[in-house]
Amino acid sequence: MEIKDILVHVDVDEGNKNRLQNAAELARSYEAHLTGLYIIPNLVIPMYAEVSIPADVIEMQEKAAQDRAEKAEAEFKAITDQVGCSAEWHCVRGYAERQLLLHARNTDLVILGQAEESGVMSVQSDLDDQVVLGAGRPVLMIPYIGVKGAIGKNVMVAWNGSRESVRAVNDALPILQKANRVDVVAINPGAGEGDIPTAEICLHLARHGVKAQASQSVAKDLDVGDVLLSRAADMGMDLIVMGAYGHSRLRETVLGGATRHILAHMTVPVLLSH
């Protein structure tokens, strides 16, 4: 598979400009087409309030929403023109989750921004969960603090042998094949997984032209997400590839889990597959 169609979610949060810059540069690198998707949310008016809200107030809200969309479009076009990638703009109205899932299925890669807890104008914080679980496409999450430099030159693959991690490795192949360095790491591998539990997947990657290093780490008293982020920082990685939600999302929310921890504390981009 090649990456030829990329969809980036355009919002009005503080991380939007950095996310668009990263998306445009990635599209140029892979000679891919970039689609910017902006979603104007439906105006929700409680039934009991429909009569009491003046028409001019609704009109003002609609105009404000349209103004934000036009501002976002101008920023998208300015960045894609400056970077020099093939691009187009889509502005739709509706529920963010539904529209993103609808458009994601016609692309090779979806790019979202990490949710900002303090972001007033950003979409609901669990949007990333919904898209990762429902899109059927790999999702590249960009930290809201932004990313400087190229994405995918030094890649760490989080491997646990699950269906999700297998899917993530397969989805990331075009990126891994272009990377300068790929490290496949298993955190707290279980018994019976061999002396080097990542050796077989590294052999598989080698057959696809990827020179990957196999490693493992034992840190029983630390959260897996913390270990992954710490290793990524120590090794100078610019991308983490991992399977998402090996357990149910509810179980991850209640008991904690690597996916949720990474999404909350990510410092480098993360490619997620489910």
Image (cartoon, helix red, strand yellow):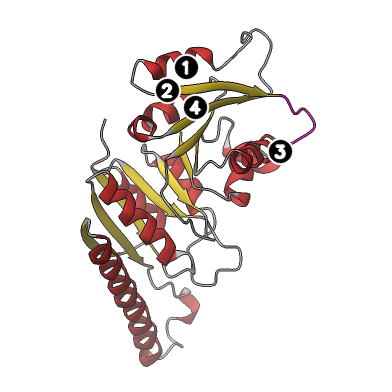
User: Is residue 267 part of the magenta span, yes or no?
Assistant: no
Mark number displayed over residue 211: 2
Q: Is residue 218 visible?
A: yes
Q: CA distance from mark 3 to mark 2?
A: 36 Å
Q: Which residue is mark 1?
A: 201
Q: Magenta segment, which residues?
A: 218-222
Mark 3 or mark 2, whichever is nearer to me: 2
Q: Earlier in the sequence, mark 4 or mark 1?
A: 4
Q: Nearer the viewer, residue 196 or 103?
A: 196
Q: Earlier in the sequence, mark 2 or mark 1?
A: 1
Q: Is residue 95 visible?
A: no
Mark 3 element type? helix
Q: Residue at x 67, y 15 (%)?
A: 190
Q: Earlier in the sequence, mark 3 or mark 1?
A: 1
In the displayed structure, does residue 77 sit left or right of residue 12? left
Q: Earlier in the sequence, mark 3 or mark 4?
A: 4
Q: Amino acid at mark 2?
A: Lys
Task: For the residues labelled 3 and 1, say whether their Cβ atoms are less than 8 Å apart.
Answer: no
Task: For the residues labelled 2 and 1, say whether their Cβ atoms are less than 8 Å apart.
Answer: no
Location of residue 61 with respect to 121 vertically, above or below: below
